[in-house]
Amino acid sequence: MILKSKMKNLVLFETLLLFCLVFSTRIVSISCLNSDGLALLSLKKHLDKVPPELISTWKTNSPEATPCKWFGITCDDSKKVTSLNFTGSGVSGQLGPEIGQLKSLEILDVSSNDLSGIIPTSLGNCTSLVYIDVSENRFSGKIPDTLGSLKSLADLYLYSNSLTGELPKSLFQIPALNYLHVEHNNLTGSIPQNVGEAKEILELRLFDNQFSGTIPESIGNCRKLEVLYLHENKLVGSLPESLNLLENLTDLFVANNSLSGTVRFGSTKCRKLVTLDFSYNQFEGGVPPELGNCSSLDALVIIKCNLSGTIPSSLGMLKNLTVLNLSENRLSESIPAEIGDCSSLSTLKLNDNQLGGELPSALGKLQKLESLELFENRFSGEIPIEIWKIQSLTQLLVYKNNLTGNLPVEITKLKNLRIVTIFNNSFSGVIPPGLGLNSNLEILDFIGNKLTGEIPPNLCHGNKLTVFNLGSNQLHGNIPASVAQCKTLSRLILRDNNLSGPLPEFSQNQDLSFLDLNSNNFEGSIPSGLGSCRKLTAINLSRNKLTGAIPPVLGNLQKLRYLNLGVNSLTGLVPPKFSNWKELTTLILSGNRFSGFVPPDRGT
């Protein structure tokens, strides 16, 4: 009996010992994980969705005493966490306050995820931080003022979130700060006046927010600044002259604000400037001649800024300039011949101004020019032959001027030419017959000139022509068969000419959406092939000599909104299938010889 009792006690002791061993092992496994590991496990509790790699490594029963082998974690020699990086890992949830317990953290990169909530103020406790990137998430709330205590911080990327409130002044007191990117948020208030304290800053990107007030004059103290993006805000006042002190500046964008006053920018210290955009502001005065000092400029863009006066000849000193866009201002007088010295220029946009006089032949020296946009000005005279010889030209937009003269044969040799819009001028003579043979024309608009002769037969030779407008000229002859075979054509306007003969079938013009052939001398029947042009929204065949019945297949045109067949010699019944035109707002059939019921004109 005594032996049996002892055996029972022994079994009980062994069971208890085994339990203690197992329990103590679990305690050891938890207690062995260092403080950084415990902080990370607490952080994990705030996350809703994490990648499998994080689930499989961030564990309470990790065999290691440190988290140094966990997904996204890097440690130093003392096994302290120095980097937390799970950029673009599909993580959602919040960044918990426990992040502030990682005292040795140098790099925090949780960019391009779906994190939300606030940026924890405890992040300011991570005094070893050098790099923070929480961009491209859904963080909201204010930028913590505590980030200003991170004296080693060099890179701070907070862009593309939903942050609100003002930009903390403390950020500009971080002595090591090189990069501050807060663009694409909803930040408000003024740019802090102490911005000039950031002596080491290289890039300051504040664009696409709601910042108001003036640009601080102290910005000129940021002598190492290379990139300054302030566009798409609500900034007012003048452009600070202290910007002229920034001799390392390469990119300056202040577009889409409400800046005013005279532009005083451009000094001998702007020689590293590559891109300058002042567009969509309310400045006064003219284009600063001093911009000619910015010898490295690649792009000078000042669109719709209320600028007046002349184009400075000093811009001709900009040998590296590839884009010059001064459009939508009130600039007057002629284009200075010196612009022809901008030997790298590929885009010249001076449209929507009050420029006049003759175009300088010196523009022909721009042998890299691809786009010449001079429309809606007051230019007169002929386009110099030197311009027609620029082989790199892809776009020539000179419509709505007072230009005259013939289109030279040189236009047929421009192999890169895609878009030519010269409408509403006074060009005369014939269109060179070879036009289109050597190029891939896409848009051709010659409406409202005094052109004569026949339509060239090869305009769609490159099979890319989408817009073909020759209306309101003095052309005669037939529509070339190639036009009806142009499968890419979407818009055809030949109205108000002396064209004649039968209409082509148009059966291959499946993309055709707008057709205006009114006020010519076309004869014969309306082509039934139009019924297969299912994208047509407007047809105007009025004031011709068309005969026969309306093809019933036109009833297939479900998108048709405008139909004008008036003043012809059409006969027969109006097809009942026309009731299919649900979107039709304008119908004109008067001035013909129809029998039976004729729907009354509407929408005229």
Image: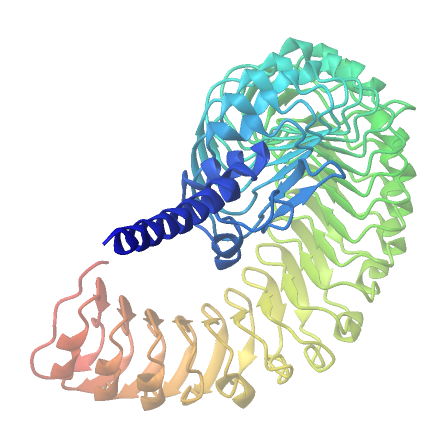
Q: Nearer the viewer, residue 439 or 132?
A: 132
Judge whether 347 appears above or below 503 on screen.
above
For the N terminus, the image quarter is bottom left
Residue 129 % position (x, y):
68, 28
Give the quadrant of residue 470: bottom right
Residue 133 % position (x, y):
61, 37
Judge whether 58 appears above or below 571 on screen.
above
Residue 172 % position (x, y):
68, 16
Q: Nearer the viewer, residue 467 or 432?
A: 467
Q: Residue at x 62, y 77 (%)?
A: 453
**Which colour style is shown?**
rainbow
Q: Residue at x 84, y 26 (%)?
A: 289
Give the quadrant of residue 379: top right
Q: Is residue 258 visible?
A: no
Q: Residue at x 86, y 28 (%)?
A: 248
For the C terminus, the image quarter is bottom left
Q: Residue at x 26, y 51 (%)?
A: 2
Judge whether 433 appears above or below 424 on screen.
below
Residue 318 % position (x, y):
88, 39
Find the residue positioned furthest to the left.
Answer: 597
Q: Is residue 77 left or right of residue 83?
A: right
